[in-house]
Structures are given as structure tokens and as C-alpha cells.
Image: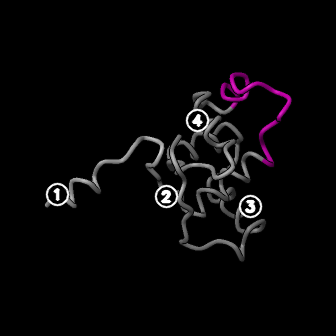
């Protein structure tokens, strides 16, 4: 019983989350194809109808577990159907798409 309690205690820095590979690829695509590094997060987040914090998470190396609702909003502002967006993802990353995940340590 003590062992279970010890396992539950983790420092915030040691906590990890899982980011599925597809989420990472989606974020990487948005970052590479649609995000302009010269523009601020604030201005681009307004262009895409999302909070600047969400854009910061998309720009991270491993991306994050992007909700479908956020993806739908971004696609709406880009004037692209979500189906067409996934076709773009498949064209770019087709052979890499699977249900794997990467462990990401929270900081």
C-alpha cells in the first residue's frame, strides 16, 4: 500500500503526457505550412480564431493533443474543409501516420 502512494507522488517536472503521432503531425503541418514565423502569436491567433496560448502549443516541437474543435476552427478560418485538411496531412505524411504516441515531459 505504501508503494502505491509513493508511485502517485511525482514532481510537476516529472509528469509526462502522451501526444499521439497524428496530433504531432497535424501541429507540425500547421506550423510549417500555415504559420508565419515573422508574425506574432497574437496577430496569427486572431487570423485563425484561436487563443495565442493554443498557437504557442501548436508551435512546440512535439505539438500537443489538438482537439478536433480547435482544428475545425482553424480550418474554418483558413477556408478549408476538415476533410481536405486531412487529405493534405495524408499527402505529406502518409506512410508515417499510425496510432503511436510520444511521451512528453511537462515543464
**CA separation in Å, label 4 and label 2:** 17 Å
Is residue 40 on the magenta stretch?
yes
Residue 30 lies, in percent from the top left, at 72, 47
First in residue order: circle 4 vs circle 2: 2
- Main secondary structure found in the magenta portion: helix
- Is label 1 in a helix, a strand or a loop? helix
Q: Which residues are magenta?
A: 32-47
Q: What's the residue at 69%, 42% (across, down)?
A: 59
- The disc, 3 or 1, on the residue closer to the chain's N-terminal end is 1
Name the element at disc 2: strand
Q: Which residue, given by chain and number where applicable, does mark 1 sit on?
A: 2
Quarter of the figure with residue 40: top right
Residue at the spot of label 4: 54
Residue sitting farthest toward the left:
1
Depth check, mark 4 against mark 2: the one in front is 2
Of labels 2 and 1, earlier in sequence is: 1
In three-dimensional space, the C-alpha distance between marks 2 and 1, rounded to whole angstroms, equals 27 Å
User: Which residue occupies the extreme right position in the image?
Assistant: 38
Q: Position of residue 4 (x, y in %)?
A: 21, 59
Give the answer, above or below, for where 28 lies relative to 22.
above
Q: Which residue is mark 3?
A: 88
Relative horizontal placement of residue 14, taking residue 32 as reference (left or right) = left
Amino acid at each position: 500500500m505504501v508503494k502505491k502512494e509513493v508511485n502517485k507522488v511525482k514532481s510537476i517536472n516529472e509528469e509526462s503526457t502522451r501526444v499521439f503521432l497524428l496530433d504531432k503531425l497535424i501541429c507540425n503541418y500547421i506550423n510549417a505550412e500555415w504559420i508565419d514565423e515573422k508574425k506574432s502569436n497574437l496577430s496569427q491567433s486572431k487570423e485563425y480564431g484561436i487563443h495565442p496560448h493554443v498557437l504557442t502549443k501548436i508551435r512546440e516541437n512535439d505539438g500537443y493533443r489538438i482537439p478536433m474543435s480547435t482544428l475545425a476552427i482553424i480550418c474554418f478560418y483558413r477556408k478549408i474543409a476538415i476533410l481536405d485538411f486531412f487529405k493534405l496531412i495524408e499527402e505529406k505524411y502518409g506512410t508515417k501516420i499510425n496510432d503511436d504516441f510520444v511521451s512528453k515531459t511537462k515543464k
